[in-house]
Amino acid sequence: MILRNNINIKTRIAPTPSGYLHLGNVFSFVITWVLAKKSGGTVHLRIDDLDEARKRNVYIEDIFLTLDWLKLQVDSGPSGAEDFEKNFSQKHRLDLYRNALEKLKRMNSGLFSCDCSRSKIKRHSPDGQYPGFCRNTNNQDQKGFALRIKTENPTAIHFQDMLQGNLEIDLYQEIRDFVIRKKDGLPAYQLASLVDDMVDDVNLIVRGKDLLSSTAAQLFLAQKLNEEKFIQNRFLHHPLILENPGDKMSKSHQSLSIKYLRESNVSSSSVFETIGKWMNLKAKKIDSIHALLEAFEFQALPKSAICPGDNVLGNTL
């Protein structure tokens, strides 16, 4: 196994309660869980719920129903929706996020206020990259303004990926002057995710390849904050499951949800059989998370996107 056994591996699964979980989410969960268990490590459940506009209680419940249906047990984190709201919601960590933000301010990290709307940015920048309209503003605490961090041209971030190898991401090209505090005053994903991983002592971060720029952004922030522990983390970016060529599975596309599968009496064993095929495993029968764990071979993991076609679960639907 690529992870050394003398290191206490801790990873996490970190769904957002913005829609019902789909097969792409489960594929990521399973890879994360198997990598940890193959290395004698642990898995933490984190739910990213700072986006109040999209958060729904039914989506939080769906996370726990899905994990239970898959019999995918985590080692730490909330035991259910009520426990999550009471003890684990990101709202309980707002002071930690603010402390990190204040540290960035004290260290003159290139923060600036911005009131640009998404529509304004899109009008002036068809690729969605921030055009730099507010870069020369000095006030970092204007109410109703977002807070961005400057990325100069170029801002190259280098890191080793367990599956993809040596990578270089230019933040100026990928996620220029990204937001670290939103207009509502809440921390943006890049800052909150970094702080959460540091507080939770996570040292293996597993994500889809679509989040390569997020990893680079968080490494950039960790460098600014002198958080060497995070910089030394292990990263793995797995391929995406595509609904159609070039079109990843997502909640917004109303992809094949686990809720739909459960309510259609599809068995979880069919899901594991399908994921086993996506992971190129050769075992004759993969009908549970533990069977998949036993059959898992790191070198078999695909590096490029998987497009299963219309009939995702064979003849089960």
Image (tube, rainbow, N blue to C red):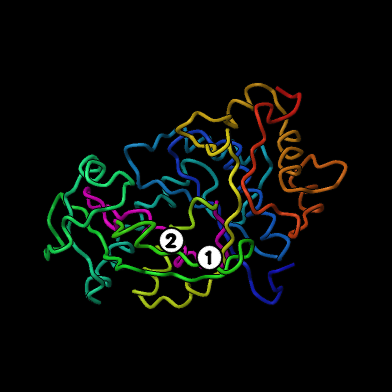
Residue annotated with mark 2: 196
- Quadrant showing the N terminus: bottom right
Q: Is residue 91 left or right of residue 308?
A: left
Q: Earlier in the sequence, mark 2 or mark 1?
A: 2
Q: Closest to the observer: 93 or 114?
A: 114
Residue 44 appears anywhere in the view: no
* Disc 2 packing (10 Å; few <14; some 14–19; many ≥20): some
As shown in the figure, which amino acid type bears the numbered disc 2?
A: Asp
Q: Is residue 23 left or right of residue 227?
A: right
Tell me the quadrant of the picture where the C terminus can be found.
Answer: top right
- Whether pointer 2 and pointer 1 mark residues with C-beta atoms closer than 8 Å, the reply is yes
Residue 166 image offset from top left, x and y in percent: 57, 69
Q: Determine the secondary structure under disc 2.
A: helix
Q: Residue at x 22, y 41 (%)?
A: 123
What amino acid is labelled 1 in the image? Val
Which residue is disc 1 drawn over?
202
Give the mark count.
2
Q: Which residues are magenta?
A: 179-208
Q: Judge whether residue 23 is colored magenta.
A: no
Mark 1 secondary-structure assignment: loop
When asked about the image quadrant of residue 17, the answer is top left
Q: Nearer the viewer, residue 186 or 312?
A: 312
Q: Residue at x 73, y 61 (%)?
A: 38
